[in-house]
Image: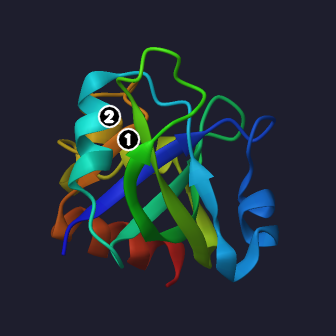
Amino acid sequence: MAHWLVKSEPSKWSWDQQVKAGAKGTHWNGVRNHLAKIHLMTMKLGEQVFFYHSNEGKEIVGVVEVIKLFYPDPSDLTGKFGMVDFRAVEPLKTPVTLARVKQTPSLAKMSLLTSARLSVQPVTDDEWKIICEMGGI
């Protein structure tokens, strides 16, 4: 199974809100980048995804799981984009900041650094393990 990272500004949708959505989870809408759309389309049920607070906080704060595969995003009037549903799995015991990621040589090629503006990103198995260890899970 693949691993991913999704970004959200906490003032728009935070980790706490994701947790409050409970087991039913919630949709991940509003993606308007074609590469991010392809990543959403590639996701499989049960895949694990880092939840990253962008702009405010700039840190990986938790793990969510894909619970519904790609489907049309009704907020997209063009009909080109879609969304998936996630449910919260667990918080990182210690959030992993962007600064810490930048200071870790083995993460130098992580999409979080090389494709900083992309809101949905792949995460390699090695990157996943390193971030989980840094985050205490």
Estimate the x, y position of residue 12 in percent, counting from the top left.
76, 35
Percent position of residue 132, x then y: 41, 75
Tell which residue pokes out farthest to the top in this image. 78
The residue at 27%/24% (across/down) is: 34
Q: Would residue 7 be found to the left or right of residue 39 on screen?
A: right
Describe the element under mark 2 as helix, strand or loop. helix
Labelled disc at residue 14: none
Which of the two residues, 120 or 100, is positioned nearer the viewer here?
120
What residue sits right under mark 1 in the picture?
A: 120
Which corner quadrant holds the N terminus? bottom left
- What residue is shown with label 2? 36
Tag 1: Cα neighbours inside 10 Å, few (<14), some, or many (≥20)? Answer: many
**Is 29 placed above or below 127 here?**
above
- Disc 2 vs disc 1: Cβ atoms closer than 8 Å? yes
What's the coloring here?
rainbow
Q: Nearer the viewer, residue 7 or 43?
A: 43
The amino acid type found where label 1 is placed reads Val
